[in-house]
Image (cartoon, grey):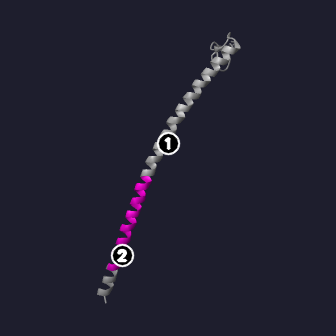
Amino acid sequence: MATAISMAPLHGNPKKRGRKGSFAGLPEEEKKKRFLERNRKAAQKCREKKKVVIEQLKSDADVAQKIFEDLDLEVKRLRTVNEHLYHLKEEHQATQHTRGM
């Protein structure tokens, strides 16, 4: 029994035309005009997207900075508490050592 071999292209739909086909039959000047207009729109969309991304990054950086400042204050507070507890321990050990004599 023989099997049929398809001669269809390996990629894409052969009935669909690519971008080049969208300008088929137009004068070169009109093709260039349409291309430039499409390119202008794409560039504007890209700039707008970039602006949104930059604003989000700035917002994220502000939040991270605030968290860092809060944590820095907490570290300073805990160091002060630790120092105070260390001194209390030293005083307690000194009084215990004195009582033991």
For the C terminus, the image quarter is: bottom left
Q: CA distance from mark 2 to mark 1?
A: 45 Å
Residue 93 appears left or right of 57: left
Residue that label 2 marks: 87
User: Secondary structure beneath disc 1?
Assistant: helix
**Up-down relation of residue 36 to residue 59 (above or below):** above
Seen as rendered, the residue at the extreme top is 25
Residue range highlighted in magenta: 67-91
- Image spot of residue 57 (x, y percent): 50, 42
User: Secondary structure beneath disc 2?
Assistant: helix
Write the residue at 70% across / 14% down.
28
For the N terminus, the image quarter is: top right
Q: Nearer the viewer, mark 2 or mark 1?
A: 1
Q: Which mark is residue 57?
A: 1
Towards the viewer: 1 or 69? 69
**Up-down relation of residue 88 to residue 41 (above or below):** below
For residue 77: magenta?
Answer: yes
Residue 21 occupies which quadrant of the picture?
top right
Disc 1 marks a residue whose amino acid type is Leu
Query: How would you classify the magenta stretch by its main secondary structure?
Result: helix
For residue 9: magenta?
Answer: no
Disc 2 marks a residue whose amino acid type is His
Write the residue at 35% across / 71% down.
84
**Which of the two labelled residues, at mark 2 and mark 1, occupies the earlier sequence position?**
1
Mark 2 residue crowding within 10 angstroms, few (<14) / some (14–19) / many (20+)? few
